[in-house]
């Protein structure tokens, strides 16, 4: 901001400089307004398309197949997410008087057990010195859930007044991830864990909750999921930045069907996974949902990162290796080529290759708990001689084979990638294979059997964000339910500069008095 100055005391050159500064400031303001309007227009258009699909003639059919239920849930989640983003864009504007009122929600079932949580002012003494008198209270109810049982938290905010100076004091409403919503953060965490960790679609959760005595429409659950996805996004951005601060990363990708609203067929989208190594001081995994397997997806995620990338031989990573990244090969992939041959029992060469590669893995198991410098020293002493002999033996065996045979292909795979496959010998921080990230991709393979497809690019990225936090919590030895519950509780009151403390590898549960 420009400081307050006396224009009459400025010289002509200073006035010109001041005018230029003001012009730049106005330009920045105009650009910010333009970007705001573009984003608002984009989101408004997107939500109109989703609403037309959700509430149009297509949704009026009586069909209630699981596939249709899944797509409707995802559309509702997207609508809630976009509404939340629009609210955030408009939160600095004065509220419009013509905004439609939200429908009044039904009261929570009276038969549910209730616990009362009282919120009283820190002091019942007025600033003028008089004792405050209790004059009433405000009561709000939030729906809580423990596995198999619902209960209600009654938040009672007492009102206190000073008769002398007519001052009214009341404890403030605690910030909540869903403002004025009925779910506790425990229930929100339950819904997210059930959907993304236990792979239970919302229409199935609706049935489970109904058996427990509470009717929670899928549209309501979808609204919660969509809004939580928006609120958790900054935390995932911070996790990604943290991963990119490491010199060694794993990378892998797996297909996920995606169905855009209004289309009858799915097409193949991809989840890209990036993680620090198993032995890294900080463990974390970040998923990135993309509509294709184009190498641009990896370049956009890694940006200008210049570290060592452990990956398979997929060509999508090659452009990054040409701009400063270092390729590290995966011995599990090389071994797999020989294993497929040995399984058929018709390749003595493959069986012998497996035995030699097995010796390399034996060494890795022996040194798994050693510090990086010691791992690299032992690899130099024990693994490097085996590697040199293996290469000589492979070259000799390949010279006697006809091109195009399966055994020749397995040998060629290793020899063509030899430099990448042997780089782990030079750095104790680098693993021998990419199995660690393949383990982190496995939940997606399990999940897509249940939820069948992603409904849109937005819903796919929301799933990637939530699952990044859940899986990172798991590999840090945390209970993901307890972690998400606490994070959702603290996120609304946590400054952006302090959000790093909520990442799984930094997290410690808040102390409740």
Image (cartoon, rainbow, N blue to C red):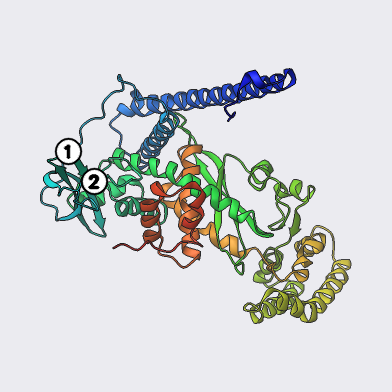
> Gap between marks 1 and 2, in whole Å?
9 Å
Q: Is residue 402 left or right of residue 334?
A: right
Residue assigned mark 2: 127
Q: Is residue 175 left or right of residue 386?
A: left
As helix, strand or loop, the secondary structure at mark 1 comes to: loop
Among numbered discs 1 and 2, the one appearing first in the sequence: 2
In the picture, the quarter occupied by the N terminus is top right
Density class for disc 1 (Cα within 10 Å; few <14, some 14-19, many ≥20) is: few
Residue closer to the observer: 312 or 10: 10
Where's residue 4, x and y in %?
57, 27
39 is higher (above) or lower (below) than 117: above
Identified at 31% across, 40% down, the residue is: 179
Residue 72 circle label: none
Identified at 40% across, 54% down, the residue is: 487
User: Quadrant of the rendered structure where residue 373 is?
Assistant: bottom right
Residue assigned mark 1: 165
Residue closer to the observer: 425 or 262: 425
Residue furthest toward the front? 9
417 is higher (above) or lower (below) than 211: below
Identified at 65% across, 42% down, the residue is: 300
Is the C-beta separation of discs 1 and 2 under 8 Å? Answer: yes
User: Quadrant of the rendered structure where residue 403 is?
Assistant: bottom right
Identified at 78% across, 47% down, the residue is: 323
Where's residue 501, x and y in %?
48, 57
Where's residue 127, x and y in %?
23, 46
In the picture, the quarter occupied by the C terminus is bottom left
Density class for disc 2 (Cα within 10 Å; few <14, some 14-19, many ≥20) is: few
93 is higher (above) or lower (below) than 182: above
Where's residue 62, x and y in %?
28, 31
């Amino acid at each position: 901001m420009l400081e307050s100055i006396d224009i009459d005391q400025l010289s002509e050159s200073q006035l010109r400089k001041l005018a230029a500064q003001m012009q730049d400031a106005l330009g920045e303001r105009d650009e910010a307004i333009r970007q705001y309007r573009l984003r608002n227009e984009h989101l408004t258009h997107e939500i109109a398309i989703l609403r037309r699909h959700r509430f149009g003639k297509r949704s009026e059919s009586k069909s209630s197949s699981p596939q249709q239920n899944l797509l409707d849930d995802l559309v509702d989640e997207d609508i809630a997410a976009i509404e939340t983003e629009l609210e955030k864009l408009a939160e600095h504007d004065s509220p419009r008087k013509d905004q439609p009122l939200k429908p009044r929600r039904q009261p929570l079932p009276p038969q549910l057990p209730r616990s009362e949580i009282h919120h009283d002012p820190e002091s019942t003494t007025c600033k003028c010195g008089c004792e405050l008198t209790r004059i009433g209270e405000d009561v709000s109810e939030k729906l809580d859930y423990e596995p198999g049982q619902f209960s209600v938290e009654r938040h009672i905010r007492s009102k206190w007044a000073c008769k002398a100076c007519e001052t009214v004091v009341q404890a403030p409403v605690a910030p909540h991830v869903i403002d004025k919503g009925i779910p506790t953060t425990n229930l929100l965490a339950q819904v997210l864990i059930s959907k993304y960790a236990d792979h239970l679609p919302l229409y199935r959760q609706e049935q489970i909750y109904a058996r427990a005595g509470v009717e929670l429409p899928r549209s309501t659950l979808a609204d919660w999921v969509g809004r939580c996805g928006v609120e958790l996004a900054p935390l995932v951005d911070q996790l990604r930045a943290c991963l990119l601060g490491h010199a060694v990363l794993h990378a892998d990708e797996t297909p996920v069907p995606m169905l855009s609203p209004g289309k009858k067929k799915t097409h193949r989208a991809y989840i890209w996974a990036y993680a620090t190594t198993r032995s890294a001081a900080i463990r974390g995994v970040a998923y990135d949902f993309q509509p294709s397997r184009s190498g641009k997806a990896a370049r956009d995620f890694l940006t200008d990162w210049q570290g060592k990338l452990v990956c398979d031989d997929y060509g999508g990573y090659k452009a990054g290796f040409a701009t400063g990244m270092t390729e590290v090969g995966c011995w599990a992939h090389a071994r797999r080529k020989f294993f497929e041959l040995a399984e058929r029992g018709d390749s003595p060469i493959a069986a012998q290759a497996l035995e030699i590669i097995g010796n390399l893995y034996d060494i890795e198991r022996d040194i798994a708990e050693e510090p990086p410098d010691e791992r690299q020293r032992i690899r130099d002493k024990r693994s490097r001689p085996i590697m040199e002999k293996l290469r000589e033996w492979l070259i000799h065996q390949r010279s006697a084979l006809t091109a195009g045979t399966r055994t020749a292909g397995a040998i060629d795979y290793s020899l063509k990638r030899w430099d990448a496959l042997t780089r782990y010998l030079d750095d104790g921080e680098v693993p021998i294979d990419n199995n660690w990230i393949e383990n982190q991709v496995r939940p997606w393979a399990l999940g897509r059997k249940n939820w069948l497809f992603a409904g849109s690019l937005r819903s796919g990225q929301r799933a990637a964000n939530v699952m990044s936090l859940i899986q990172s919590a798991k590999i840090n030895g945390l209970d993901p339910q307890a972690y998400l519950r606490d994070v959702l509780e603290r996120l609304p009151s946590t400054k952006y500069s302090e959000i790093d403390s909520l990442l799984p590898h930094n997290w410690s549960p808040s102390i409740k008095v």
